Amino acid sequence: KAGVTQTPRYLIKTRGQQVTLSCSPISGHRSVSWYQQTPGQGLQFLFEYFSETQRNKGNFPGRFSGRQFSNSRSEMNVSTLELGDSALYLCASSFGSTAYGYTFGSGTRLTVV
Amino acid sequence: GNSVTQMEGPVTLSEEAFLTINCTYTATGYPSLFWYVQYPGEGLQLLLKATKADDKGSNKGFEATYRKETTSFHLEKGSVQVSDSAVYFCALLAPNAGGTSYGKLTFGQGTILTVHP
């Protein structure tokens, strides 16, 4: 059974550019969440999508956005990149019930220079 | 708001030693509790979970019991191996005011575990 797949694994971008990250959830999972992991702030929740609808959002500026497609695949976009956006971005998928927990992908390592 | 506090690390042990990583939480409502593990260069792997008071989650020799009276979910293992070296995260999923949690795990700061042969 395939796990959560995130692409690309590594990205280097320049300040001011924008970036799109992709996440393919486990087959049958309809909930996709995104997290930012940094040494200073730890793991912080970005947003969650279920059936193409954003149901929950963390405390990030509007430069961070996401969407989910009808096949449950999700993308997140960061516009006008800042140096502080350098982080590991993790995607997690679930059936949508807490009883199952969340399965994480290996992440996308974004470096902004 | 919701929060998770883990014991300060890093933790360094010899192989076959006993492991305890403390985790306490503050949450609205009745949270579900999780332990995740992260190996170098990888994402998070669910280690174990508990969804109600007195539940004991267990996996690969690791155990944690949901203690509502002390708001704790301490991770234990009787005999650690070198392969257990990783970062361990305690996390909770708590309902919001509407009674749902919608994917928002709240994590502790992580505890680095190093096990020497």
Image (cartoon, rainbow, N blue to C red):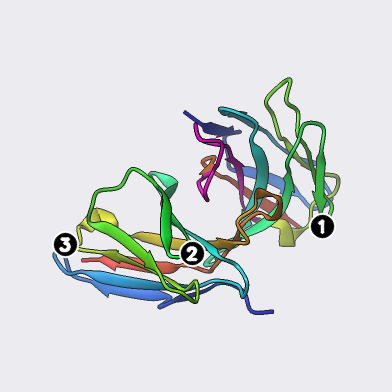
Q: Is residue B82 above or below residue B53?
A: below
- Left or right: residue B52 compared with residue A96: right
Residues at marks 1 and 3 on the same chain: no
- Left or right: residue A13 compared with residue B68: left
Q: Cα distance, mark 2 to mark 3?
A: 28 Å
Q: Which mark is residue B115?
A: none
The residue beneath circle 1 is B60
The magenta stretch spans residue B102: yes
- Left or right: residue B92 compared with residue B63: left
Mark in front: 2 vs 1: 2
Residues at marks 2 and 3 on the same chain: yes
The residue beneath circle 2 is A51
Q: Cα distance, mark 1 to mark 3?
A: 44 Å
In the rendered structure, which amino acid carries the disc numbered 2? Ser
| Residue A103: % across, % down | 61, 62
The magenta stretch spans residue A34: no
Q: Mark 2 near mark 1, Cβ–Cβ under 8 Å?
A: no
In the rendered structure, which amino acid carries the disc numbered 3? Thr
Q: Mark 1 near mark 3, Cβ–Cβ under 8 Å?
A: no
Task: Tell me if residue A36 can be seen.
Answer: no
| Residue A78: % across, % down | 26, 63
Structural crowding at the residue carrying mark 2, measured as other residues with C-alpha within 10 Å and reported as few (<14), some (14–19) or many (≥20): some
Structural crowding at the residue carrying mark 3, measured as other residues with C-alpha within 10 Å and reported as few (<14), some (14–19) or many (≥20): few
User: Circle 2 sits in a helix, a strand or a loop, which is it?
Assistant: loop
